[in-house]
C-alpha cells in the first residue's frame, strides 16, 4: 500500500519508521535535509516541497496513494493538505490537530474539511495518561473489543511478588492471560514453566477487572481510587481534558492554574474539580496546593517545569507522579528520576495514526519500541483460526504468537489450548513483530 506522509518532524518520522517495512512510503517536507535523511535511513521516497502544493503531492504519488497523512505542526497546513488531496484523489486522509475548536468543527462538518480521520493531540494525550494512571504500575494500557478486553504492560521490580515464580504458579486470575514477556529487549512467549525475573516487562490480556486485580497484586496499596487526592498542574487543553476524564470516572481532582481569567473559565467548565489560582514557580506553591498530601501529581506544563515538579512532589511525600513529556529525548530522564507515568504526545498520535493505517486487524497496539503488537481480529471463514482449537492452530503459526482473549457474542472467554474459535469471534492476540506478517496473513 502506498502512503504519503506530509511533514517530516517527530510525528511524521515516527509514522514513517512504523510503516516503512510493510508499505511503500513517500515523505513530503520543506526541509530537504530532513527528507533526504529519511530516504537514506528508511528507503522512503523523499520529496522536498510544500505539502499544500499539488505539484509536490503529485511528485509523491498521491494518484496511487491509498492513504495521505498530514502530520505537520500547523493545523491549518494539515487541513489544506487534506483538502488538496480530496479535490484530486479518493485517498483516505488523516490529519493531526492541536486546536480543540478544529476538532469540534470537524466532528460537525467532517466532509467539508476533506479529512477522513482527525486526531486531536491533546485529547488523545489526556486519554492515554488517564488510562495509565488509573491502573497502578502500568507502563502502557490499551482496550479492545469496545472495552471488553484490556491489555497492560508492567515492569517487575526486584521485590515484586511474581519474581522467581513460574507462570503456572502466578496463574490465579480466571480472566487473564500472560501473553508476553519482554526481557532485555527480546520478546518471549511464556509457557507455564517460564519463571519471571526482575526487570521483566510482562504483558497481560484479559477483562478490565482481572487486569486491575493483577495490577494491585503487583503494587499493593498503589491503586488510584476516586476518593484519592489528585492534583493537576496546568489548566491548558491537556490539563483540562485530564480533569474532565477524571470527573467522568468519579474523581474530584484539584487543578492549579496561574492565569486568573482561565481559572474563572475552568471553574465553570469543570463542576467536580477544585480549580485554584497558583504559581508553581513560587516557594509557597507546594504548601498552597497540599502537594505533600496528594496521592497523584500530574504535570502538564513544559518539560523542564514538569520534571522539577515531579522531583519536588516525590521529595515532600506525594504518592505518585505523572507527566506529559513533549520532547522524546527527555523520556528516559523522567523515568530515571522515578516519575511513575510519562506520556509523550507525539508518540501517542503517531501510534494512533499507524493503528488507523494498518489493514490486517480491527485494532492494534504497539509495545516496547515496536518489538511486539497486540491485535484485535474478527475471525472470518478464511482465517486459520476458524473452527479450530487454539492448540491445533499453534502448530501452523510461528512461535511468537499467543491468543490472549476471545470475545463471543459480547462475552469474554479466557482462551485455553482446547478453546475452539468460531467465525465471528473477536480474538485479541499478542504477536512478536518478527512474526507479524506471517501471523497477520494467516489470521
Image: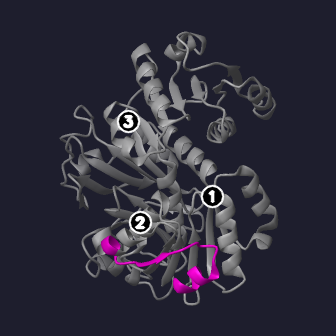
Mark 1 crowdedness (10 Å alpha carbons): few <14, some 14-19, many ≥20: some
Mark closest to the chain's N terminus, 2 or 3:
2
Residue at the spot of label 2? 34
For the residue pair 222 and 420, the one nearer the viewer reads as 222
| Point 35% across, 69% down: residue | 37
Closer to the N terminus: mark 1 or mark 3? 1
Residue at the spot of label 3? 334
Q: Secondary structure at mark 2?
A: helix
> Which badge, 1 or 2, is on the more N-terminal residue?
2
In magenta segment, residue 42:
yes
Compute the Cα span from label 1 to label 2: 17 Å
Distance from disc 2 to disc 3, alpha carbons, whole Å, reads: 28 Å
Q: Secondary structure at mark 1?
A: loop
Note whether 292 is above or below 91 in the view shown.
Answer: above
Q: Is residue 391 visible?
A: no
SS at circle 3 = helix
Residue on which disc 1 sits: 74
Give the image location of residue 39, x and y in percent: 37, 75
Tag in front: 1 or 3: 1
Q: Which residues are magenta?
A: 40-60
Q: Is residue 36 magenta?
A: no
Is 356 placed left or right of 240 in the picture? left
Q: Residues within 10 Å of mark 3 (few under 14, many from 20)?
A: many
- Whether residue 221 is visible here, answered yes or no, is yes
Amino acid at each position: 500500500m502506498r502512503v504519503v506522509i506530509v511533514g517530516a518532524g517527530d510525528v511524521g518520522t515516527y509514522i514513517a519508521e512504523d510503516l516503512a517495512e510493510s508499505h511503500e512510503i513517500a515523505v513530503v517536507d520543506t526541509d530537504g535535509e530532513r527528507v533526504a535523511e529519511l530516504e537514506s535511513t528508511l528507503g522512503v521516497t523523499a520529496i522536498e516541497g510544500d505539502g499544500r502544493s499539488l505539484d509536490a503531492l503529485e511528485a509523491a504519488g498521491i494518484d496511487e496513494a491509498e492513504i495521505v497523512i498530514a502530520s505537520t505542526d500547523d493545523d491549518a497546513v494539515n487541513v489544506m493538505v487534506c483538502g488538496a488531496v480530496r479535490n484530486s484523489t479518493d485517498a483516505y486522509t488523516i490529519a493531526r490537530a492541536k486546536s480543540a475548536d478544529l476538532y469540534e468543527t470537524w466532528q460537525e462538518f467532517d466532509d467539508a474539511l476533506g479529512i477522513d480521520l482527525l486526531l486531536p493531540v491533546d485529547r488523545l494525550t489526556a486519554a492515554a495518561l488517564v488510562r495509565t494512571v488509573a491502573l497502578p504500575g502500568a507502563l502502557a494500557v490499551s482496550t479492545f473489543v469496545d472495552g471488553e478486553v484490556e491489555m497492560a504492560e508492567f515492569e517487575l521490580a526486584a521485590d515484586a511478588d511474581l519474581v522467581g515464580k513460574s507462570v503456572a504458579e502466578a496463574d490465579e486470575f480466571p480472566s487473564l492471560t500472560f501473553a508476553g514477556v519482554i526481557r532485555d529487549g527480546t520478546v518471549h512467549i511464556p509457557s507455564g514453566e517460564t519463571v519471571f525475573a526482575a526487570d521483566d516487562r510482562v504483558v497481560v490480556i484479559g477483562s478490565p477487572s482481572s487486569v486491575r486485580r493483577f495490577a494491585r497484586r503487583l503494587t499493593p496499596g498503589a491503586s488510584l481510587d476516586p476518593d484519592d487526592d489528585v492534583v493537576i498542574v496546568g489548566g491548558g487543553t491537556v490539563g483540562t481534558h485530564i480533569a474532565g476524564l477524571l470527573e467522568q470516572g468519579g474523581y474530584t481532582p484539584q487543578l492549579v492554574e496561574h492565569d486568573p481569567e482561565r481559572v474563572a473559565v475552568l471553574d465553570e467548565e469543570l463542576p467536580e474539580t477544585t480549580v485554584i489560582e497558583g504559581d508553581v514557580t513560587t516557594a509557597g506553591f507546594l504548601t498552597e496546593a497540599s502537594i505533600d498530601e496528594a496521592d497523584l501529581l500530574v504535570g502538564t506544563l513544559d518539560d523542564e517545569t514538569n520534571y522539577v515538579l515531579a522531583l519536588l512532589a516525590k521529595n515532600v511525600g506525594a504518592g505518585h507522579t505523572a507527566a506529559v513529556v513533549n520532547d522524546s529525548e527527555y523520556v528516559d530522564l523522567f523515568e530515571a528520576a522515578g516519575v511513575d507515568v510519562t506520556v509523550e504526545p507525539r508518540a501517542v498520535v503517531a501510534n494512533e495514526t499507524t493503528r488507523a493505517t494498518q489493514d490486517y486487524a480491527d485494532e492494534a497496539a504497539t509495545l516496547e519500541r515496536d518489538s511486539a503488537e497486540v491485535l484485535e481480529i474478527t475471525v472470518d471463514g478464511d482465517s486459520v483460526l476458524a473452527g479450530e482449537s487454539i492448540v491445533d492452530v499453534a502448530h501452523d503459526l510461528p512461535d511468537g504468537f499467543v491468543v490472549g482473549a476471545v470475545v463471543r457474542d459480547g462475552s469474554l472467554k479466557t482462551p485455553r489450548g482446547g478453546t475452539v474459535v468460531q467465525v465471528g469471534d473477536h480474538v485479541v492476540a499478542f504477536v512478536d513483530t518478527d512474526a507479524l506478517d506471517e501471523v497477520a496473513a494467516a489470521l
